[in-house]
Image (cartoon, rainbow, N blue to C red):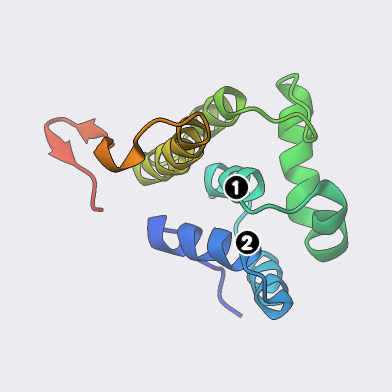
């Protein structure tokens, strides 16, 4: 079987599958994660862990090689799996040379979380628009 290649859309799809109410989607997503080059895509994997909505035990049961590598990196950086914050997540992604698309996707999910909090506080979300794109030598990454 070929190794899985992560791009922004694939990472987003896996996060959505893990967040799905359909348990079959969780099985398929975790199965796909078993066939990934962990070192190459560590930024995307940390993102999937952060935003996929599954605890460490679920990962240990379904994708132990991936979660063990993620945890090792976190421990080496003084970060806890159970208390992973958004700033820590971004730091780990950038330290792992995460792609610009990976950083953009992190920012999208961070903004979604932030807007949910603002909405809960009564701010008019329909009047809020935030777009994030990283530039590389004047070039924007593909959406």
Please tell me the numbered disc located at residue 102.
Answer: none
Tally of numbered discs: 2
Q: Residue at the spot x=60%, y=47% of the render?
A: 51
The Cα atoms of the two marked residues, 2 and 1, are separated by 8 Å
Secondary structure of residue under mark 2: helix
Report if residue 117 is visible in the image: yes
Q: Is residue 79 above or below residue 66?
A: above
Q: Residue furthest left?
A: 138
Q: Position of residue 74 (x, y in %)?
A: 73, 30
- Mark 2 highlights which residue? 19
Q: Position of residue 1 (x, y in %)?
A: 61, 80
Report if residue 5 is visible in the image: no
Q: Are marks 2 and 1 in contact (CB under 8 Å)?
A: yes
- Mark 1 highlights which residue? 51
Of the numbered discs 2 and 1, the one sitting upstream in the chain is 2
Secondary structure of residue under mark 1: helix
Q: Quadrant of residue 111?
A: top left
């Amino acid at each position: 079987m070929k190794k899985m290649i992560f791009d922004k859309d694939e990472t987003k799809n896996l996060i959505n599958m893990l967040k799905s109410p359909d348990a079959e989607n969780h099985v398929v997503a975790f199965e796909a994660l078993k066939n990934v080059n962990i070192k190459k895509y560590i930024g995307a994997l940390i993102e999937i862990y952060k935003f996929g909505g599954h605890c460490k035990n679920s990962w240990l049961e379904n994708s132990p090689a991936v979660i063990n590598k993620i945890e090792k990196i976190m421990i080496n950086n003084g970060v806890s799996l159970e208390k992973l914050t958004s700033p820590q997540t971004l730091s780990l992604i950038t330290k792992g040379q995460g792609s610009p698309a990976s950083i953009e996707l992190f920012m999208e999910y961070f903004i979604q979380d932030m807007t949910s909090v603002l909405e809960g506080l009564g701010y008019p979300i329909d009047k809020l628009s935030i777009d994030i794109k990283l530039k590389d030598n004047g070039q924007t990454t593909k959406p």
